């Protein structure tokens, strides 16, 4: 068992190559986002809970018929999630009573600027597109469901009843329509313009213009401007977001930041461990065997 | 002595009979072999495995929902929590003992190193098997290596490292397989690679034991604050060292009781001394772990959560971690091997609890309804672990794991 110089150089060379491979992990960070990305804005003070966005979404994405019609308001009795085992939808509207007010909140994928799910995906099936939507590639997904673990908004869903082609289900901001220049189905269907589609930068200005224009109508907060590093879907509201079950504990830094430090350690370990342990091996291998009579003592160490 | 002569004689007649009877049926005829299999243990194991295989069949025809309670809030159920996140730390046995013997030159541990490597190899193999059952599209398991890459994902790292390390361990263990099959040249080639394989094992293990913890860095609001900390990678790595060590102690005890006839005197007579030595190392590591854990909770400022049901649950887990090293030290001072084994068991329970708590039991702690598992999932987990035990026994019955092969005594690597 020995390692000659040629082996050593070979091993070292392949390690350096390996460590360069790992470098792509940190490249993503200084990126501030695609310039003309689209986003959506929900104005919760305008929403009347008509569920037409749900119906339009269902149609545009060829989802199965719901159990009860989209005019049924009894669904508001419970807080629904966009995708459950027996309800296949990309978006739901929930009703909240806050003091005197009745507020409706539309729930769907937030299309984060730097999504946790994208950084979690080990095959790159989930991607933030230059257009803005976070999309999923069925061709490479292996069904590990780390995206579900990672998402702070509890959005991606998995088809647990499918044995052969379980898909990840969530809102894709009608990416198929956006690339053709068509507005997402929910925004198009909304009768009261509670949902606005546009460039995220313009939507942010619009959101603050509305808040500054009617300071009594709105609270002073655009949800999604900074949450989780910023999201593509923005919300403005007349009541605090904490009373509408928005996650309030997710902070303002992007989720991929959480694993960045760890990933940066990888190269360091790959390069330094062989030197450290190779060195220890060389130091100990020629160590003389213990003398007779000292054997007992040797056993006591470690 | 007669056994050695017998083996020598058989070697001279390398016929099909030799291969079937000597290699496959452990020197018995087919009839004798089948009769030897009919034992109460095998009967029960067989029933469990059959039930498990039936549910695995259900999973591959009707989807994961048919056997697991996994959901869109709790995507990973018992299969991964036990099979991957809890199983892998104990599989550190292979790399920890390999490092002690081949890098630090602690020849004292030589008698257990093959067993440790086998335990590590099987641990990883079955982690992959659990993963194959749990993945939505397991036929794509090689995609992260060949088809599509997501290098910013911690799981990408885990996938690569588990795949590479499984290969490394298979190569490390193959020297025993070659001894068993009488393939001297292959054995020699593999032994020449020991140092390289061991160092590769250290690199891959350091990174992915910690990566298993790092995976949960992405879920800060979901793992309970008494368990979630940015120290998670360190905590997972340090505790995996202790896990690997106590695993060797506990399996050592079991082999002493149940597989004595497959071990040689070199293994059996050294086991007590080795247990004491490992106990010392484990105690040191556990002290470090306890300190690191206290530092982590202080750093995250999470002590306030102690006054809650989860806080009580944390105290139970944490006191096991605190008791274990004290118990181990006490046992070592009195050279009480039995008590070291008890300390090892306490450590094992603490680490199992810690992994299940972090990835599973406290996950989504803020949700009022927190369902844990479906009984069918439990059967599958028990069945797969039973297969692992049966495979371990099959290998130890045949290959030189707890003993040296008579042909190679004195030819240590």
Image (cartoon, coloured by chain):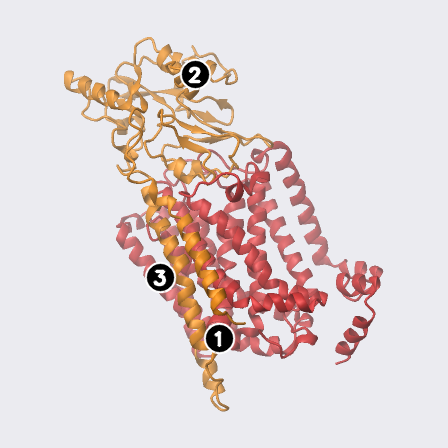
Mark in the foreground, 2 or 1: 1
Image location (x, y in percent) of residue B371: 47, 38
Mark sitting earlier along the chain (3/1): 1
Q: In this view, does B95 lie to the left or right of B12?
A: left
Q: In which quarter of the image is the N terminus of chain B?
A: bottom right
User: Which x, y percent locates residue A71?
Assistant: 42, 10
Q: The red chain is which one?
A: B
- Is the residue under label 3 in contact with that under label 2 (CB below 8 Å)? no
Chain letter belonging to callout 1: B
Chain of the residue where label 2 is placed in the rendered structure: A
> Mark 3 highlights which residue?
B290
The answer to which image quadrant residue B291 occupies is: bottom left
For marks 3 and 1, give the CA distance.
28 Å
The location of residue B45, given as percent across then percent down, is 68, 53
Residue A57's mark? Answer: 2
Judging depth in this view, the residue of A107 and A20 nearest the camera is: A20
| Colour assignment, chain A | orange
Disc 2: CA contacts within 10 A as few (<14), some (14-19) or many (>=20) = many
């Amino acid at each position: 068992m020995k390692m000659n110089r040629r082996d050593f150089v070979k091993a070292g060379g392949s390690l350096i190559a390996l460590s360069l491979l790992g470098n792509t992990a940190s490249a993503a960070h200084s990126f501030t986002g695609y310039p003309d990305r689209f986003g959506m804005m929900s104005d919760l003070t305008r929403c009347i809970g008509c569920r037409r966005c749900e119906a339009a979404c269902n149609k545009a994405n060829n989802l199965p018929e719901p159990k009860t019609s989209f005019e049924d308001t009894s669904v508001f009795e419970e807080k629904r999630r966009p995708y459950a085992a027996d309800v296949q939808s990309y978006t739901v509207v929930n009703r909240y009573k806050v003091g005197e007010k009745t507020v409706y909140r539309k729930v769907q994928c937030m299309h984060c600027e730097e999504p946790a799910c994208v950084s979690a995906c080990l095959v790159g099936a989930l991607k933030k597109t230059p257009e803005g939507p976070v999309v999923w590639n069925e061709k490479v997904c292996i069904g590990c469901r780390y995206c579900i673990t990672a998402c702070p908004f509890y959005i991606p869903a998995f088809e647990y009843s499918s044995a052969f082609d379980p898909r990840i289900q969530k809102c894709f901001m009608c990416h198929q329509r956006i690339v053709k220049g068509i507005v997402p189905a929910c925004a198009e269907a909304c009768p009261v313009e509670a949902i606005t589609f546009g460039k995220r930068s313009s939507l942010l200005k619009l959101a603050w213009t509305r808040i500054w224009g009617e300071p009594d109508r709105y609270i002073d907060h655009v949800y999604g401007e900074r949450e989780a590093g910023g999201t593509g879907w923005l919300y403005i509201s007349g009541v605090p977001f904490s009373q509408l079950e928005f996650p309030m504990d997710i902070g303002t830094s992007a989720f991929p930041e959480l694993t960045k430090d760890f990933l940066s350690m990888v190269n360091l370990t790959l390069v330094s461990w062989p030197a450290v342990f190779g060195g220890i091996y060389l130091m100990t291998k020629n160590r003389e065997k213990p003398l007779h009579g000292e054997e007992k003592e040797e056993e006591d160490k470690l | 002595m007669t056994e050695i002569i017998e083996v020598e004689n058989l070697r001279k007649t390398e016929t099909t009979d030799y291969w079937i009877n000597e290699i496959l049926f452990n020197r018995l005829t087919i009839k004798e072999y089948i009769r030897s299999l009919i034992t109460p243990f095998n009967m029960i194991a067989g029933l469990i495995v059959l039930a498990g295989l039936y549910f695995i069949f259900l999973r591959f025809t009707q989807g994961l929902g048919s056997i697991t309670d996994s959901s869109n809030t709790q995507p990973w159920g018992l299969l991964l929590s036990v099979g991957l996140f809890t199983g892998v730390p104990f599989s550190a046995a292979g790399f920890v003992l390999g490092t002690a013997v081949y890098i630090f030159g602690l020849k004292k541990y030589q008698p257990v190193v093959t067993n440790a490597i086998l335990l590590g190899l099987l641990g990883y193999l079955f982690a992959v098997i659990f993963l194959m059952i749990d993945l939505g599209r397991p036929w794509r398991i090689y995609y992260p290596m060949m088809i599509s890459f997501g290098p910013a994902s911690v799981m990408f790292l885990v996938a690569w490292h588990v795949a590479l390390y499984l290969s490394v361990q298979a190569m490390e263990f193959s020297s025993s397989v070659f001894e068993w099959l009488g393939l001297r040249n292959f054995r020699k080639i593999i032994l020449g690679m020991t140092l390289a394989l061991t160092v590769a094992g250290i690199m891959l293990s350091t990174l992915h034991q910690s990566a298993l913890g790092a995976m949960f860095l992405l879920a800060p609001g979901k793992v309970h604050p008494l368990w979630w900390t940015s120290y998670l990678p360190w905590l997972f790595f340090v505790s995996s060292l202790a896990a690997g060590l106590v695993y060797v102690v506990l399996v050592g005890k079991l082999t002493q009781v149940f597989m004595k006839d497959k071990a040689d005197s070199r293994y059996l007579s050294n086991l007590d001394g080795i247990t004491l030595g490992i106990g010392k190392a484990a105690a040191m590591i556990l002290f470090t772990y306890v300190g690191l854990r206290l530092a982590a909770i202080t750093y995250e400022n999470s002590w306030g959560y102690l006054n809650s049901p989860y806080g009580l649950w944390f105290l139970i887990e944490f006191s096991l971690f605190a008791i274990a090293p004290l118990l181990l030290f006490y046992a070592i001072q009195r050279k009480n091997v039995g008590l070291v084994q008890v300390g090892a068991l306490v450590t094992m329970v603490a680490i199992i609890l810690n992994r299940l708590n972090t990835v599973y039991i406290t996950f989504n702690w803020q949700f009022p309804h927190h369902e844990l598992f479906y009984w069918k999932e439990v059967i599958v987990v028990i069945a797969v672990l039973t297969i692992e035990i049966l495979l371990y026994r099959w290998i130890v019955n045949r290959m030189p794991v707890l003993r040296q092969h008579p042909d190679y005594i004195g030819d240590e690597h």
